[in-house]
Amino acid sequence: MSTPELTGRTALVTGAASGLGAAIAETLHSHGAQVALLDRDARANHDTAARLGARAVAITADLADLDRLDAAHTEAAERLGPIDILVNNAAMAPMRGLWEIEPAEWDAVFAVNVRAAFFLTRAVAKGMRARGFGRVVNIASLAGQRARPTGAHYGVSKAALIAMTRNFAAELAADGVTVNAVAPGMMETPMVNTIGAAKKAELAAQIPVGRIAEPAEIAGLVAYLAGDTAGFVTGATYDINGGVLMR
Ligand SMILES: NC(=O)c1ccc[n+]([C@@H]2O[C@H](COP(=O)([O-])OP(=O)(O)OC[C@H]3O[C@@H](n4cnc5c(N)ncnc54)[C@H](O)[C@@H]3O)[C@@H](O)[C@H]2O)c1
């Protein structure tokens, strides 16, 4: 993979205030892109955008609110120009046991992890299609490819996102718009720290490469998929999990 040149491209990254989203925003920005960082955590998002400096703007929105989401991508395009690269990264991941999941939490997970990605992609893809260029990258998860006893709603939502990636890829393939998914294994982010240090160490020991991923390692793959040279890659799901799932 060569270093993608993203100068002149505009990216919108959801969940960009922290964790993987922040690493993706930073990587795309370092390759020359203008980046709109979207997150519901206004303060952290502004801090992350300020750290990037010029060519980065922070937009506050909760992905569960579709009206606000519509206003948010419109605001991004008004401030930076038409969106060429969309990264659907934000997610909710409550690690509850299968028997403890309530309908309201099931719906909340799907509203953010699946519904928001669907409607945001559809809205942004209209412009991409009209301009004949676009890159959409959906952040899925190993949890959507392999079952775990906890977080069933999260795992099912990520499997849905992988399926949705193919729907959009098929629809947009002839228009210069690629749509791919990246399925990371365990990463060093605030999300993973919610499980506690002991559990984290136990899970890390089960990874063949012997460690948890750094977000920057995943972000590098996203930057490749966002670049001009990845135009023949579409509808794919990239396993990036330290060898946990080999196929
Ligand atoms: N951390 C891991 O081990 C891991 C593993 C596999 C996949 N993933 C996936 O990677 C992506 C990023 O995860 P992370 O670990 O960086 O998570 P994180 O919890 O550290 O960060 C998620 C970001 O999304 C934002 N966000 C959450 N819900 C939102 C909403 N409704 N509206 C707007 N913003 C919202 C949060 O404020 C936060 O800034 C997610 O899609 C996650 O499922 C993470």
Image: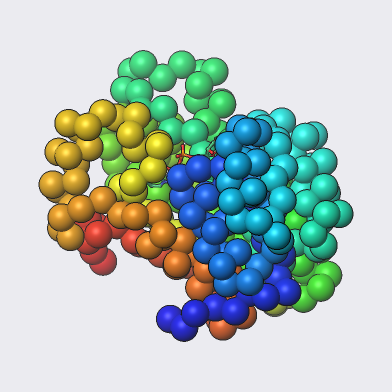
Quadrant of the image containing the C terminus: bottom left
Quadrant hosting residue 28? bottom right
- x%, y% of residue 146? 30, 47
Tell me what residue is drawn at x 63 percent, y 33 percent: 43
| Vertical side of 179 occupied by 149: above or below | above
Quadrant of the image containing the N terminus: bottom left
Quadrant hosting residue 59? top right
Question: From the viewer's perspective, is 72 left or right of 51?
Answer: right
- x%, y% of residue 79? 83, 54
Question: From the viewer's perspective, is 154 left or right of 240?
Answer: right
**Residue in front for this viewpoint, 122 or 80:** 80
Question: From the viewer's perspective, is 9 left or right of 109?
Answer: right
Question: From the viewer's perspective, is 27 left or right of 40?
Answer: left
Tell me what residue is drawn at x 56 percent, y 26 percent: 108
Tell me what residue is drawn at x 52 percent, y 50 percent: 22
**Residue in front for this viewpoint, 236 or 62:** 62
* Residue 39 visible from this viewpoint: yes
Tell me what residue is drawn at x 54 percent, y 18 percent: 104
- x%, y% of residue 107? 56, 26
* Residue 142 visible from this viewpoint: no
| Vertical side of 228 occupied by 50: above or below | above
